Every structure is written in C-alpha cells, then in structure tokens.
Image (cartoon, grey):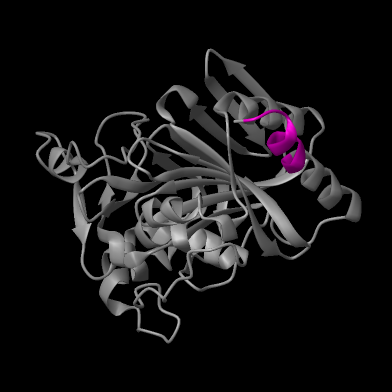
Amino acid sequence: MSAPHDSAATNDLDELLSTPDFAGQLLRGCPGRVARHLPLLDQVVGVTVAGPVIMNDVGVYADPTGMGGPIRCQPSQITVRLNASHLRTALITEPAGQGMPATLRFFDADGGCAHVTYLTDRSDRLAFESLTLAGYLTPITGDDLDAHPLALRFGQFDQLDQFDSVLFDGGPARLRSLPQPHSGATQVPLRRVIGALSHAALLSMPATLVAGASGCLQMRSGLLTGSREHEGSMVLASGSGRTMIDFSLLKQAWVTWANGACGRTGSIELYDDSGRCRFIATQTGPQTRAAAAGWEQLMGDIVDDEPA
C-alpha cells in the first residue's frame, strides 16, 4: 500500500490528482465533518506519516475529537485528534488495480497527506460510498471539528494543553516555550530516548503513543508489547498498532510534564529540524498506582541519567 507524506516540499494532493490512472473523488464540504463518519467504516487501517514517524493501526475509529475536546484513547480503537482549520480537503480513491484497497485521505493546507484510512475486507462499503455526501449533509454542531481553534497556553499545564499546543501549529510555538524556566522541561539526548522506550517495551508498560502530522494527531494507547531498534530506526508495538521512528531525522528530544488523570505525568516529545513535534510518548487516562509510578520513574531516569 502506498503511504501518505507529511511534507510541503511535494504536493501529495496535486501529484495524486495528476496520476494518469487516478480513480477517485474530492469530497465536498469541510474535512472535519467528513472525519465524523470515520467510525461508520468499521474495520480499517489508519495510517499517519509524520515526517520521520509513521503510525499505523487496525480496528474501528473512535469518534474523532477536535482541539479542546476530550482525550479518547481506548486500546481497541483508532484515535485521531484534529485541527480541521489546518486540513484542506478530503478525497476518496478506488484504484482499479487488483489488490489495491480503497482509501479515504485527508490533506493539509499545503496539499500534504495528513492521514489515510485504508479499507479492508471487513469495512463497511456502504458507509464508504456515502462519504460523497458526508461533507455537506452533516449539520454543524457546537463541538464541530471545524470550530475555530481555542486560545492556547504554551506552558506546562494539562494534557489537553499539551496535545493542542502541538495541533495548533505543529509544535514550533510549543518548542520555543520549553527552554523557559517555568516549563519544567528538560532536553535530553536522543540516544537516551531509544533506551527508555526499549526498556518500557521490555517491561510491557502502559503508554500512549502519538504521531503528529499537520492538523492530525494519531494516538495509540495500551501496553507496549515489543520494540526493535537498528542504527537509529525503531519500531514500537502496542496491540494492533505499530509506530516506526527514524531517529536520524529527529533533532531534539524533551522530557515534559503535564497534569493528567493520575496527576503530574511525564512525556517524551521528539522534534524534527523544522521544530515540529513528530512524536509523544506519555500515559493518558486512569492507571494503576504501580503503572503511574513506574512511568514517573522512567521519565525521571531519562532526565537524571547524565547531562544532555
């Protein structure tokens, strides 16, 4: 299957539309309202390519949320958090070739592909075909995904602020705030992050992994069930989800702190050379006392190991 690309250097949308054998349709209306229909597709594969980070997951979508909405991270569901003001359009493709799945693709303002949904044999084809109507027949509601982004606080507050400060502009404004003394954040070597994530997977720690593309965060919560790293390329397994990280294309790693369901919760945040936050590892939702304490100790060990 082809992969989406989160890059303004090449316009994925124009390239796709100019393909000689292209078979698909641009969807009318706002991408945020199209996204509300994702749970109706049943069993699918959801993929986000966030520069050097790729996340894919298999299952049924949870109801997508926008900025300011609740954090939804159930292990059995594909979770996306959207800033629809950064999404340009949605498009469906139905390749004529044998073995090529139909897709629903969301593109950012620069024409880069922010998120792709691949249909499977267990997907609801009728729901997929009805997407041509979804964008302009879905009524606007008070919590519509296309609502104007909320004002943000670029400090260490709660996890909603943390995720939405990344969704706001991709992360550069948040990154500029991290060196401030009040943030409590600490820059750490990338190699230390590789060791910490490997250790967390070895202990099957519960974690929420986040891939950050323009206008879209894909999130996966559950036990880390495996990891593999070779020459800076790492794969993390969590249930049906896989996250691939190319550390050679990342420039900064930070340990940050935000208030979550279990109180003050640490996160690993990875940034590329453009200042975009491409990956977050943290814990969300209720945890056992032992799980929360283990994660807190891991975050503390990353910071205290040695000077960055």
Which residue of the protein is positioned furthest toward the bottom in this rendering?
142
Residue 177 in the image, given as x and y percentages of width and height: 46, 56
**Residue 117 location (% of width, % of height):** 41, 47
Q: Which SS does the magenta portion mostly show?
A: helix
Would you identify the image quadrant in which residue 21 lies?
top left
Q: Is residue 153 magenta?
A: no
- The residues colored magenta run 299-307
- Residue 102 vs 201, above or below: the answer is below
* Residue located at (21% from left, 67% from top): 28
Q: Position of residue 188 (x, y in %)?
A: 59, 34
Please name the residue shown 48% across and 70% down the image. 153
Residue in the foreground of this view, choosing between 185 and 248: 185
Q: Magenta span has 302?
A: yes
Residue 35 is at least partly visible in this image: yes
Q: Nearer the viewer, residue 156 or 165?
A: 156
Q: Is residue 247 left or right of residue 241?
A: left
